[in-house]
Amino acid sequence: MPEARLRRVSSQRFLPALKFIAVAFCATAFLLPGAQAAKKEKPAASKTTAAKKGFVPVEAKRSASSKTARGAAVASRGGRAEKNEKVEKVVRGGRNVVATIHKKNGKTVVAVQRRSVVRVEQPARQSFGQMAGLHGTEDSLDLKSSVALVIDQDTHEVLFSKNDHAVLPIASLTKLMTGLLISEAHLPNEELITITQDDVDTEKRSSSRLTVGTTLSRGELLHLALMSSENRAAHALGRTYPGGLSTFVSIMNAKAKMLGMKDTRYVEPTGLSSRNQSSAQDLALLVNAAYADATVRSLSTSPEYQVEVGNRVLQFNTTNRLVKSPDWEIGVQKTGYISEAGQCLVMQAKVAGRKLIMVFLDSAGKFSRIADAERVRRWVEATHSISGSPAASSRNVGYQVAG
């Protein structure tokens, strides 16, 4: 009897455990299909939540190698990474921001990473000279400028020429005419002029340190226009000329005609418009006339200049680094650039005892116009010094320099 009772007690002892296992099995069989369906619906809900936060889900497929690497890492850490740091979703916010959502110690952790963006530059816009095929013209000095002209200012001898009849946009070389007319008008240099919205460049949208409302004297604006090629300064000078901007542009064209610049046309005083056009031969005439004006000579060859704007002092520098070079003796100069014109440079300089007028238009490369001027200087020093005889490549065509 005691033995039989012991067996019954043992069976009853395991009965609750068997019941629990049976119930758990039934519950699993009943709830598993619903759990799987809910798991399929969860990504859609996550997408909705991510969209509300401004993130766009990124679909990522793991390769077999990445699974193997992750499995090895989990095994080395005893399975802790899988329990404590499980990646749930990778989402993108904007164009280069990626967020990774982790589960760590029962908490949701979002790690945001900014990806570096490789920008593909658009092909540079071709200049008028490139479109016309002028860069294919070869020359003995291997200049990068498609147009060049070097003239002895005293004898009018043409020492070097390349496509000197070509009519091209001249960019800020325009300001040399602007400065010459302002100087010749003898307007009060102390008169204050305020930069307005009309002076803001709406064609090329170039920047300027002279904000709308800045007030400077006419003399200061002229200095900045000639030395540092300040567009708003040049436009304000033309706008405040007696009669207004249209009158000033008309006078620019009349002056060009008077100087014998037959291929030249101006439509505005800054050079931002590609419709301001001229040839190397015409520009040589302008450089000669500008050199005769003491104010233009002084301001265009100034290395630096400071102006007071409100409670600030703004430092401006020349756009032509040759001005500061001890190897050059420059009497007047002006640089220019817009994409249609390329890099441009005109100068009057004394080289090897000669007073030369140099014109370089449509040069390819940021520093190529400077390099071209250096090539010409070394070539003149070697072959055209004042005490030596000119090389055979030079020609005297009786080039008339007016002014």
Image (tube, rainbow, N blue to C red):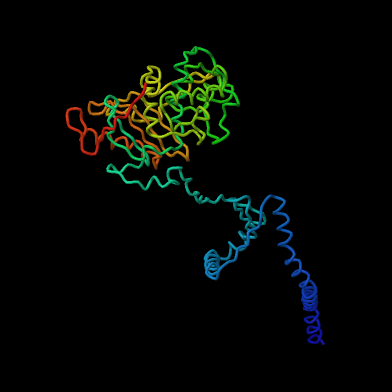
Q: Can residue 328 be seen in this view?
A: no
Quarter the C terminus occupies: top left
Work out whether residue 170 or residue 38 is closer to the camera in this orientation and state it: 170
The residue at 42%/29% (across/down) is: 261
136 with respect to 216 (left or right): left
| Percent x, y of residue 291 | 36, 22
368 with respect to 64 (left or right): left
Q: On screen, 86 above or below 110?
A: below
Quarter the N terminus occupies: bottom right
Quarter holding residue 334: top left
| Percent x, y of residue 7 | 78, 84
Q: On screen, 349 above or below 13?
A: above
Quarter holding residue 165: top left
Q: On screen, 379 above or below 45?
A: above
Work out whether residue 113 or residue 400 is closer to the camera in this orientation and state it: 400
| Percent x, y of residue 372 | 32, 38
